[in-house]
Image (cartoon, grey):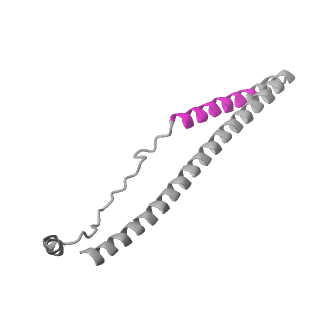
Amino acid sequence: AYWRKMTKTIVPFDPYYIPQNLQKRAKSDKRSDDIVAIMDTMEAKEMNVKAAEHKIRREHDYTNVLTYLQSVTSLHNTEKEGRNYLIGEVEMCRAKVGHAEESVSMLNSQLTELENRHEYVKQNWV
């Protein structure tokens, strides 16, 4: 038939290499606003602890010891909250990476299957 003669002269599709240019997502060393807020809060709490320490040495009053202990407790609580926030962020990033790895694996298997189909069609129909 006429159409079979025409398909024999058509060059089958050959996959081409397409270069992928990967760029750094973080072009600067700027920290995120949430991280800066955590760091600023901790710095302020540390300054309160240092001020309480100086007051203890200067005045020798037990009320300053209580202020110092309160500021240390506040600093520890802030550190704990910041640590828990960062742990949550790391866990979320790990979950996203795991999902991306699964997606890439699935896409690779689909690509292999499509390449096999392409070869089969190329061998039997063209």
* Residue 35 sits in quarter: top right
Residue at 44% across, 60% down: 107
The residue segment tinted magenta is: 33-52
Q: Position of residue 102 (x, y in %)?
A: 52, 58
The residue lying toward the viewer, choosing from 104 and 23, is 104
Above/below status of 30 relative to 62 = below
Q: Which one is nearer the viewer's eye here, 40 or 23?
A: 23
Is 40 positioned to the left or the right of 1 in the image? right
Foreground of the two, 82 or 13: 13
The N terminus lies in which quarter of the figure? bottom left
Q: Residue at x 63, y 33 (%)?
A: 43
The image quadrant of residue 70 is top right
Q: Is residue 104 left or right of residue 41?
A: left
Q: Give the prevailing secondary structure in the magenta stretch.
A: helix
Percent coordinates x, y for residue 49 in the rendering = 72, 30
x and y, in percent, of residue 86 in the image: 62, 42
Question: Where does residue 59 sit, x and y in percent of width and height?
Answer: 80, 22
Is residue 51 rendered magenta in the image? yes
Q: In the rendered image of this protein, does residue 69 appear above or below residue 116?
A: above
Q: From the viewer's perspective, is residue 15 above or below residue 48?
A: below
Tell me which corner region of the image, top left, top right, bottom left or bottom right, holds residue 68.
Answer: top right
Assign the C terminus to one quadrant of the image: bottom left
